Each structure stands twice: as structure tokens, then as C-alpha cells.
Amino acid sequence: MNNISERIEQFSAHWEIFLLMLSAFLIGYFFAWWTQKSKFGTLTKRLKEEVNQLQIEKQKINNIDTIFSEIRPKIVKVVKETQEEINVSKPAPKIAASPDQVAAKAKTSFVTYAKSKPELNFDNFGYADADAKDDLTKINGIGPYIELKLNEIGIFNFDQISRFDDSDIRTITELIDFFPGRIDRDNWVGQAKALKVY
């Protein structure tokens, strides 16, 4: 009898532990489910609304395509009628003018404003030729194209650039079609003086 009562007590103890563990599991499970639902519920709802909105917009686009495909023949017809009206109302084509006549008309039609280019004062910064040429691209702000433009106007070496004054800089800026003020900002004169030492 004692043995049966001990087994009943053991069974009830195991049963109580099982029920306690089951209730803890269920509480944890439902709490996690509720947390996830509250956390992602609004996100899910918003995404569903966006998907529905996109489907509505897609339907509108399909409706527009349908309407356009129905209207397109009418548009083509109106365009053809308009072109025919234009072609009918056009005057007879003129006989092409000779190249000399075109040139004479162009000369009389357009006014030309001749602006004289300024002259460089080589006495101020010195003369040089291609034989005494330095690599001007070593100066920050002078690339191969600007170097070529400088060479075309007679500037070939660091010694010349190091002697520029403000009037020379303005003249060179205009002659090579460079950005106004850029020569001063890049300090060509200072860089040329430093490179001339080497």
C-alpha cells in the first residue's frame, strides 16, 4: 500500500512538473506571438496597402494603354489630314541659289563685330622659342591643351611665366580663352618661380 501511495505521489509530482512546463511554454509562445504580431502587424498592413495601391495603378496604366490604342487611329488620321493641308498650302519650291549668292546674302544679313585681340608685352616677361621649352604641365592648372595654347602665343618656359604681372595675366587669359581669375587662383607665377629654381 505504501508502495502504491509513493507511486501516486511520484506520478502527481511528475504531472505537476509537466503541467508547469507546459504552462510556461504556452505563456512564452503566446507572448512571442503577440509581440511579433504587434511589432510586424503595422508593417504587414502597410505593405498590403502598398501592394493594393500598385495593383490599382497598374490597372489605371492598362486603362490608359487601352484608351490610347483606341484613340491612336484618330490621331494618325488628324495628323495625315494636317500634313495634306500643309502640303496643299505650300508655295512652289524656289530655285536653289548659287553658292556666291548665298555668301553675298550672308554677308549682308549678319553684322560682324570684329574685336581686336590684345597684344602681349614680351618686353615685360621675355621672349622664348620652342628650343627653350619647359614642360609647362608641371604647373598645377596647365594641362596639355593649355600648354599648346600658351606655346601658340609665344610662352614656352617657366622664366616667362614667373615674370607675369596683372596686365600680362589679363591679356593671356583673353588670348587663350581661359577662365578669368584662374591663373591667379592657381598661382602660376609662384609655381613657375619654384620650378625655375630646379
Image (spheres, helix red, strand yellow):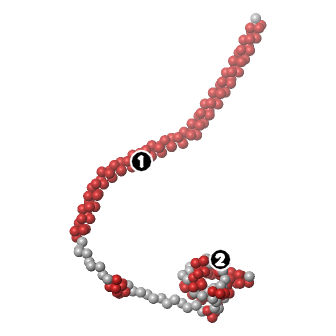
10 Å neighbourhood of mark 1: few (<14), some, or many (≥20)? few
The residue that appears at 64% across and 89% down in the rendered structure is 128
Q: Quadrant of residue 74?
A: bottom left
Question: What label sits on residue 4 in the rendered view?
Answer: none
| Callout 1 secondary element | helix
Hey, which residue is sitting farthest right in the picture? 2
Inspect this view and state whether residue 14 appears: yes
Instruction: Please give left or right for residue 109 compared with residue 82 in the image.
Output: right
The residue that appears at 45% across and 46% down in the rendered structure is 54
How many marks are shown on the rendered structure? 2
Residue 33 in the image, given as x and y percentages of width and height:
59, 33
Assign the C terminus to one quadrant of the image.
Answer: bottom right
Question: What label sits on residue 57 in the rendered view?
Answer: 1
Assign the N terminus to one quadrant of the image.
Answer: top right
* Cα separation between marks 1 and 2: 55 Å
Q: Earlier in the sequence, mark 1 or mark 2?
A: 1
Instruction: Please give left or right for residue 180 compared with residue 105 in the image.
Output: right
Hey, which residue is sitting farthest bottom in the picture? 123
Residue 17 in the image, given as x and y percentages of width and height:
71, 21
Is there a contact, CB below 8 Å, between mark 1 and mark 2?
no
The residue that appears at 63% across and 27% down in the rendered structure is 26
- Amino acid type at mark 2: Asn
Question: What label sits on residue 140 in the rendered view?
Answer: 2
The residue that appears at 22% across and 70% down in the rendered structure is 89
